[in-house]
Structures are given as C-alpha cells and as structure tokens.
Image (cartoon, rainbow, N blue to C red):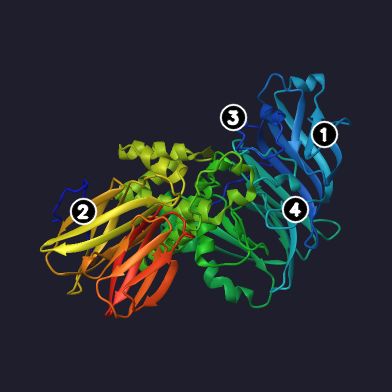
Amino acid sequence: MRIALINIALLMGFWVLTTHPAYPQALPHPVHKSFVGSNPSAVAPGYSSHEDKYDVSFYFLNLEAGNKSTFIKGYSLLHASRLSPTIDTLVVELSRMLAVDSVFLNDKREDVFYRENDLLKIPLREGGKSEREYRLKVFYQGAAGSSGFYSGISNARASNYNQDITYTLSEPFQAKDWFPVKQNLTDKADSVWIFITVDSILKAGSNGLLTDVVLLEDGRKRYEWKSAYPIAYYLLSFSVGDYIDYSFYASINGTDSILVQNYIYNTAGILESLKEEIDHTGPLLKVFTEKFGPYPFAKEKYGHCMAPMGGGMEHQTMTTISGFNFGLIGHELAHQWFGDYLTCGTWQDIWINEGFASYAEYIAIEELKTRQEAVEWLAQAHSLAINFPLGSVFLSLEESRSVQRIFNYSLSYKKGAAIIHMLRYEIDNDSLFFAIVKDYVIKFANKTATAEDFRQVVEDHSKEDYDWFFRQWYYGKGHPVFVASWRQVGDSLYISSTQTSSTGKSDFFRTHMDYRIRYESGETYDIRVLHGKPGEIFRIHVSDVVGSVQTDPDSNVLKNAMIYEYVDLSKVFSASPNPFANELNIKFRSSNKYREIKLSGINGQVFLNESTTSGSYRANLSQLSAGIYLLNVTEDGIKYTEKLVKL
C-alpha cells in the first residue's frame, strides 16, 4: 500500500493521483582532553567546583566484595590531569558511609584530608599545586547505598532462583556510593580497570574483558576486568554472585564476530529456560549494527550480569539485568550506542539515552518481528505518553536534579521514542533518516551530545529547517488533539479537522498525518496530509463509495484523535448552546422515540450516558473541564455525532 505525500492549504481542494586487544601491563598514562566545565545539569547534586579543575583519565578499582552484603574494602586509583592554574585542593565524591583508611597522592601518603558531606578533600602541598598530573589512591571500606532501585550499591535476593547478589547501579548520581569519583557527564575516563576479589564459589562480572582470574593464597579469586574504551562515570559496575558463564560469539557480517558473555544464576535448569531469550542478543546486534553503525566496543564484548533489580542498567559492555525478554535485551543493548558510546551531555537531555534506546525496541520489532507488533508498540507508547498531557521530554534544570523525573517512563522513554519516530515520519526517507542517526553516532563517539547537536546533524543532512519540530515536540509540552469529520459529495471526500492542545493552551503542532480511506467494497488506501493550521478542510478525490475514514492507522503521530462521519443533524436533533458553559440543551425533531445519549472526551472517556423518550433533554455539565467533546445520539439504530466545545 503506497502512501502519497501532499501539501495542502486551508480550504483548497486537491486531487491525489574477532580478535581482542592486548592490554598494557603497566597503568596507562593519562591522556589530556578538552573539558567544558560544570554545566549544572551535567553534574551530581553536591558536586564541588574544585572538580572542574582536573580531568579524569583512568579509574582502577581493586576491591573485595561478597554476595551477602554491600560491604566492600580495598582501594581506588584515579589518574587525572590539572586543568586550572589555581588548583589548591583535590576533591572527589565519596559517600560519608564509607570510611577512608588512607590517602596517597602521587605515591606519597597524605595525612591531611577532610570529609565534607559526600566529598573527600585533599589539600595540595606547594609542589602538588604545580603538578600537571595526579595519581590519587584511596584505601576505604564500608557498606553504603540505600534501599530502592536507585542505590549505588545493593544486595538483594533473587528468591525465585535462591540466589544472593551484590551489584552496583550508579546512574545518575550514586557512583559515590562505592568508589571515589568525579560525577560529571562531560568528563569521560579514557579507560578503566576493575578488580574484584570474591570467595572461590563466586564470580564477579564487570566492564571490558576478563583478562585474568587469579587464585589467591587464602583460596579466594580475583577477577580482573579491563576496558580500554572511554567511559562515563556512571557506567562503571560490578556484580557478585554464584554465577555460571554462558558465552557465545555473535556473527555480524559473516566475518566479524562479537563476544557475548553472560553471567547467569547458577541454578539448575536456568540455562535451558533462558537460552532462547539470551540468544536474541545476536540478531539484535546485527540489526543495530546495520541501523546505528558498528558495535562500539567490538574489541571487548557485550554481555549481561543477572541481578534482582527489577529491570536493566546498560553498564558499558555488560548490562546488569533482572531477566531476559526481547524488549529489555534490545533496549539495554541499544544503550551501548546511545548512552554509553554517545552520552547525553546533560541530564536535561536524558532523551539522548532513553528516547533512542526505547525507539530501538520499535526498530527491533520492526526488523525481527511483525509489522502489526510494531504498530501496537507505538500505540502503547503513545498511550503512556498521553497520560502526561502537560509533559515535556526536555527537563528543566530543577527537574534534572530529580531521579524520578529524569527516568519518567512515560516522558523520557515513551514520548522520547515517539518523537524520534515522528521525525523519521516527517523526513519520510529511511535511507536519509538512518544516515542521520549513524552520522550523529560517529560525530559524537566517545563524547557527550545534546538534542541541539542532533538537530544540527538532522539539518545538515536534510538541508531543511527542523527548529519548529524540536520546539513543539522536544521542548514543548503536551500533544495535539484532533477532532475531524468526513463526508462524501460525489467523487470528492471532504475531511474537516480542528486541532487543539492537551495543555489547554493555544499551542499548535504542525504535523503530517495519514488518513486511511476504506471503500464499501473493502478496498483501502492511505493519504498523507499536512496539518499546518488549527482548522482545515481537505478535499480528496475518490473513485468509489466511502465506507469509513481512519485517522493515523499506523500510529505515527502522538495525539488524541477522533473522526466521525458528518451527517446533517438538523432533521434529528439540535444541541445548544455550542460552545456551552454549564448547561447543554438537546431538542429532538420527533418525540416518543427511544434514544441513547452519550457524551465523551477525545480519549474515549464517557461523561454522560443516558436514555430518553422525551422530545428534549437538559444536562448540567458544569463539572467538565474546558475542551472538545463528542455528543453521540443513537436513534432507530443509527448513531449521530456532533462536536461540542466546553468553555
């Protein structure tokens, strides 16, 4: 079924015709990078301006951990380079719940350091103030974190599998719960080593490649994970538990393959029950490579560590995940491109991470499942987004400090995905759209980016101005509300459409939209029109008797919409006043007939459902909020519809 694209003006008629790298045996030398400073929405609450004065290049965490508590013990080594000539104190973030045993700076013990809230401050000696590079080594121990999903470090029991697991989840502001850190999105470390010592029956999963498992004299094992890729602070992780390792290689193009390493619970029968779902990772890697570009961390791996967390977290190269299903695997895998390789520049732009990863779920269904399932996914996403009629994808500075608002599922995830799809729909050229996405990934690889950066890439490729699109869908609030009627006159179909906003304000959403025309013979075809004004009438040439008209059949546009067949109601009833304030009076042209009366909103909610045989009906509707409503009167088995406006 072919869709034609037409520009339409108000009241104007128209006619539609692998190998893995060797790792250095010595600690890597710090790499100097440019650094943009502390945008308030790029850093964690409690961030110190002193942290702007150095640039992190390397984290090395050497910790002892178990699977029965969040207690950890060991040291962290941070490599950094000086950015400011006025630096006099080296400051990192570390939970006050963790005790600091000793501090070493450039291999010298520092006996003077201070704890201030969740900050660790080390005054620099005269020589240290002029050092170009710093190696900060902190020995610490304790049990930090908190209850709930957003805890930097947690211990929980997977009761269905009889397993205890300790795991980390640092996004957005909780890395300080388990290691000394600079929590600034714009300062990615160039590499990371994470060594975790555990009891002999346990395994520890983390970022990068497992380069060694060292058997210690006391019988414990040290798992040595190393990653040579740049990484944002919140993507460092570890998980400790009684795991088994299920690994395989996913073939991408017949020659290249990627290691997929999965730490799953060591429970009888679990691999047999989960294997089919886990194996979806291979086809998904192939699809996303085709759509987004090469897997960013192919020289290391992708994988999963199971943990009873109630979802998933896209830790770089090894997602922490509670269970396996197609959508969740696809979402977290897509984060390796959007969130990990390319990271949101501020928490206000969390859409860069969650909107794109959510839309990848749709792409995965579109490519690997059925078209109908993809349409249903979009419709469900729209349904969730519509629950926030005043909501915006872009966060205010105040909102960007709230974990719950950052990860609002309906806005950051589902509405975020919806606007990416609407942009694809507006571009109306998949080759161009995915070229834009790939170029965006390439331009900001191993960096951070914002929505404005994405808009610029869109405009560079399309040679079109999309400022209007981002103003109304990304920065704007709510969604459009359409009420339309149709009627056929000879070989012309007239669609009369009125648009308002879910915000109750005069916001207007310019958008194309499809209408599906179904003839009484059963034949259908779609026509795409441009809604460019709040009120419009479209004239469409038809070649048969129209039986019905459907708005946006493939759920391309986020909106509330209602369309009905126009009928001359003067011979049946009249409703007045229209617009109305409190009372609505309905008068029928004939009496002593049974009639059903229903008043509903655009979203289908019914506010009045009565029946009468009288020649008139009066309804007190003062409790209704202002907006557009549909009055349906059913008489002699025929339903008649009229649009009403409540002031």
Q: Earlier in the sequence, mark 3 or mark 1?
A: 3
Q: Of callouts 2 and 4, which one flags the residue occurring earlier in the amino acid sequence?
A: 4
Q: Label 3, secondary structure: give it.
A: loop
Point out the tag, 4 or 1, that comes first from the N-terminus. 1
Q: Which residue is mark 4?
A: 196
Q: Where does label 1 land, which residue?
A: 104
Q: Who comes first in sequence, dot 3 or dot 2?
A: 3
Vertical position of residue 487 compared to residue 435: above or below: below
Q: State the separation of the CA atoms marked 3 and 2.
A: 53 Å
Q: Residues within 10 Å of mark 4 (few under 14, many from 20)?
A: many
Say whether marks 2 and 1 touch (CB < 8 Å).
Answer: no
Write down the residue under mark 3: 35
Three-letter code, disc 3: Phe
- Crowding near the residue tagged with mark 1, few <14, some 14–19, many ≥20 C-alpha atoms within 10 Å: some
Q: CA distance from mark 3 to mark 1?
A: 25 Å
Seen in the picture, residue 95 relative to 71 is either above or below; the reply is above
Residue 120 percent across, percent down from the top left: 79, 36
Q: Position of residue 476 (x, y in %)?
A: 45, 43
Amino acid at dot 2: Phe
Cα distance, mark 2 to mark 1? 74 Å
* Towards the viewer: 141 or 492: 492
The three-letter amino acid code for the residue at tag 1 is: Phe
